[in-house]
Image: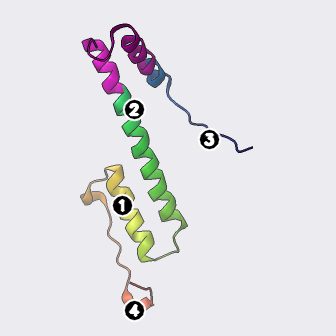
Amino acid sequence: MATEKRVQLPKTFLTHVESLLNALAYGGLDQLSWQARDEFNAVVREIEGYYERQERRQVFTQYKTAGPETREREEARQKYLDLAGILPDWQSKREIPESEGYPE
């Protein structure tokens, strides 16, 4: 039997979901109050943040598992820095010389 993947969720996220579900159960989608709309927006932000963290982690793993001094590693590093919001002024550009025999 395959085990289910477990995900940790912040308590505030679950509170927002609970509030949203209560608002939907008692008033329906058209009758959402401003507070319930704020709860909905908070839930959406939490979910988007989760996927952004997943993408950053995937790119970081790609960077760490690439061979040393390869173009793949440098591209993954640059993509991770961009996703993490590091300003280009703070990023160091690394050039990999073609003379070292690394493929394009």
Marks 3 and 4, how far apart at CA: 45 Å
Dot 2 surroundings within 10 Å: few (below 14), some, or many (20 or more)? Answer: some
For discs 4 and 1, the disc positioned in front in the rendered view: 1
Q: Of the residues under marks 1 and 2, which one precedes in the sequence?
A: 2
Give the Cα separation between the discs numbered 4 and 1: 25 Å
Q: Are marks 3 and 2 in contact (CB under 8 Å)?
A: no
Where residue 88 sits in the image (x, y, percent)?
Answer: 26, 59
Observer-side mark, 1 or 2, equals 2
- The secondary structure type at the circle numbered 4 is helix
Q: Amino acid at mark 2?
A: Glu
Q: Is residue 98 covered in magenta?
A: no
Position of residue 44 relative to residue 39, above or below, is below
Eye-nearest disc, 3 or 2: 3
Residue for badge 3: 5
* Neighbours of disc 4 within 10 Å: few (<14), some (14-19), many (20+): few
Residue marked by disc 1: 79
Sequence-wise, which precedes: disc 4 or disc 1? Answer: 1
Report the side of 92 relative to 10 (left or right): left
Instruction: Identify residue for label 2.
Output: 46
Of the residues shown, which amino acid type is indicated by label 3?
A: Lys
> Label 4 vs label 2: CA separation?
46 Å
Q: Identify the residue at horizontal 52%, vertical 63% (top origin).
A: 64
Q: What secondary structure is found at the residue carrying circle 1?
A: helix
* Chain part drawn in magenta: 16-42
